[in-house]
Image: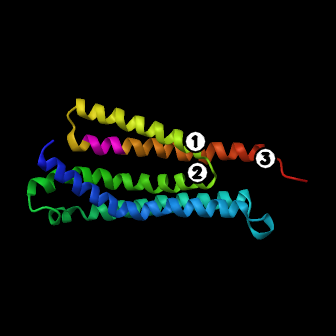
């Protein structure tokens, strides 16, 4: 690892975190809004159908906000030179920042989905998903090292972590929750 790579990683992480904070806020919102809707009586517009509608909207908001953040990050690529006076650092950060920008679209849905899972009390499923995502990232980091991908390999590994999380939160929302709701027999 060179000083250029380390500096480029710091810059790419700053770029991603600037937008990531806004996306991460969706997780907190989802963890509050979904259970609040589920706990509200049906007569007051609550219940499982209302909770699902809110979860659907939060996932859509996550996608839209993620795309917006990613576009802003891509549009800000020319500003990389403001983070370092060394042209080689700015050049080394360009591809990782672009990867991080594309990852923002994924992260918006992932953060909203994780919050929905928290709000539904799916802690075990979320822990297993996080473990699987971490194993995937570690495997990809090792592959990136073997292929000598450098900083690009690190960001690709982080992207794989988020792609596994994306698949997991969507599976939970689109498959697991409907199955659970189908088993619940309404009180007569």
Residue toward you, 73 or 132 = 132
Which residue was labeled with disc 2? 117
CA gap, disc 1 to disc 3?
Answer: 19 Å
Q: What colouring method underlies this structural image? A: rainbow
**Residue 137 on the magenta span:** no
Disc on the earlier residue, 2 or 3? 2
**Residue 155 on the magenta span:** yes
Q: Which residues are magenta?
A: 153-158
Disc 3 residue crowd, few under 14, some 14–19, many 20+, Cα 10 Å: few
Mark number displayed over residue 42: none
- Answer above or below: position of 176 versus 118: above
Most common secondary structure along the magenta stretch = helix
Which residue was labeled with disc 3? 184
Residue toward you, 86 or 6 = 6
SS at circle 3: loop
| Picture quadrant of residue 141 | top left
Q: Residue at x 72, y 58 (%)?
A: 49
Residue 60 is left or right of residue 174, and the answer is left
- Answer above or below: position of 170 versus 39: above
* Label pair 1/2, CB-CB below 8 angstroms: yes
Disc on the earlier residue, 1 or 2? 2
Which residue was labeled with disc 1? 125
Q: Quadrant of the N terminus?
A: top left
SS at circle 2: helix
């Amino acid at each position: 690892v060179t000083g250029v790579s380390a500096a480029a990683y710091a810059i790419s992480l700053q770029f991603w975190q600037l937008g990531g904070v806004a996306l991460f806020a969706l997780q907190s919102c989802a963890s509050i809004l979904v259970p609040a809707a589920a706990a509200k009586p049906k007569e007051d517009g609550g219940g499982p159908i209302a909770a699902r509608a809110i979860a659907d909207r939060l996932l859509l908001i996550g996608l839209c906000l993620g795309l917006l953040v990613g576009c802003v990050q891509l549009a800000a690529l020319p500003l990389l030179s403001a983070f370092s006076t060394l042209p080689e650092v700015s050049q080394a950060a360009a591809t990782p920042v672009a990867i991080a920008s594309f990852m923002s679209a994924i992260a918006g849905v992932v953060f909203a989905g994780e919050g929905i899972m928290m709000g539904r009390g799916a802690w075990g499923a979320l822990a297993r998903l996080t473990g699987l995502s971490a194993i995937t990232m570690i495997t990809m980091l090792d592959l990136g090292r073997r292929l000598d991908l450098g900083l690009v390999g690190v960001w690709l590994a982080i992207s794989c972590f988020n792609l596994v999380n994306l698949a997991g939160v969507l599976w939970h929302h689109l498959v697991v929750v409907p199955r659970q709701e189908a088993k619940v027999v309404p009180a007569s």
